Every structure is written in structure tokens, then in C-alpha cells.
């Protein structure tokens, strides 16, 4: 797992529900840290703003309850999409950053 160094001021809060929600992220950041703080699983997907793709249950799952992951994303991808298909709403904190070598 990479040693994640978050970019100062890059954390955003995304509240997702049964309909996918897209949010802008840094296109140049190679890594994205995600913390699931809701009660349900949230699925995430990265894409580009010129062709945004909504997250589905086939994408990467993030467990709730404070689980944390760091994901690599392709250069130029500047959109993260989140969906929580269980019902209600769930929150994830998303922060872009780099690998500490």
C-alpha cells in the first residue's frame, strides 16, 4: 500500500444515496484517500469531466464505519462518483494526494 501524503485543503465531503453523485477532484493527483463514515457501503468510480461515468454496484466498494482506503487513479481523471444503493444517505470523505517515497 502506498504511503499516502494528502494535499493540503483537498478534502471534500460527498453524501451519496441511491442515485450516483459526482464530485470534482484534482486531475493531477495520482492517489485518492477515501474514508467511509456512514453505516452502509458506498461504491466509487473515477472518470473524466468530459465523459463522467456514474458509479454502480460493479465499482469499488468502500465500507462504512470509518474504513479507509487509498486508491490510485489515472492521470487526468477529475471526477469521483459515489453511490450508496442500500437506501438513505451515506457520507465519504475524499482527499487527493501523492505517494511518499
Image: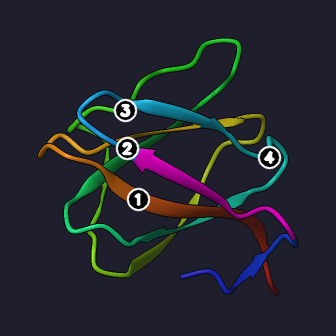
In the image, what residue occupies the spot 20% across and 46% down? 88
Q: Secondary structure at mark 1?
A: strand
Q: Contact (CB < 8 A) between labels 2 and 4? A: no
Q: Position of residue 86 (x, y in %)?
A: 11, 46
Q: Which residues are magenta?
A: 9-15
Q: Earlier in the sequence, mark 3 or mark 4?
A: 4
In the image, what residue occupies the spot 77% across and 75% down? 6
Q: Contact (CB < 8 A) between labels 3 and 2? A: yes
Residues under labels 4 and 1: Cα distance? 20 Å
Q: Quickly name the residue at label 2.
A: 16
* Quarter occupied by residue 19: top left
Q: Position of residue 26 (x, y in %)?
A: 80, 46
Residues under labels 1 and 3: Cα distance? 15 Å
Q: Quickly name the residue at label 4.
A: 26
Residue 43, placed above or below residue 98: above
Q: Secondary structure at mark 4?
A: loop
Residue 94, placed above or below residue 58: below
Q: Earlier in the sequence, mark 3 or mark 2?
A: 2
Q: Residues within 10 Å of mark 3 (few under 14, many from 20)?
A: many
Q: Earlier in the sequence, mark 4 or mark 1?
A: 4
Q: Contact (CB < 8 A) between labels 1 and 2? A: yes
Q: Quickly name the residue at label 3.
A: 55
Name the front one of labels 4 and 1: 1
* Circle number at residue 8: none
In the image, what residue occupies the spot 37% across and 30% down? 20
Residues under labels 3 and 4: Cα distance? 18 Å
Residues under labels 2 and 4: Cα distance? 20 Å
Q: Secondary structure at mark 3?
A: loop
Q: Quickly name the residue at label 1.
A: 91
Amino acid at each position: 500500500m502506498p504511503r499516502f501524503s494528502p494535499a493540503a485543503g483537498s478534502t471534500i465531503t460527498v453524501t451519496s444515496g441511491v442515485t450516483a453523485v459526482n464530485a470534482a477532484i484534482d486531475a493531477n493527483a495520482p492517489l485518492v484517500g477515501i474514508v467511509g463514515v456512514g453505516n452502509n457501503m458506498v461504491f466509487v468510480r473515477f472518470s473524466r469531466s468530459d465523459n463522467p461515468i456514474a458509479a454502480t454496484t460493479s465499482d469499488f466498494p468502500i465500507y462504512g464505519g470509518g474504513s479507509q482506503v487509498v486508491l490510485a487513479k489515472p492521470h487526468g481523471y477529475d471526477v469521483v462518483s459515489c453511490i450508496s444503493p442500500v437506501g438513505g444517505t451515506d457520507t465519504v470523505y475524499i482527499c487527493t494526494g501523492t505517494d511518499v517515497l
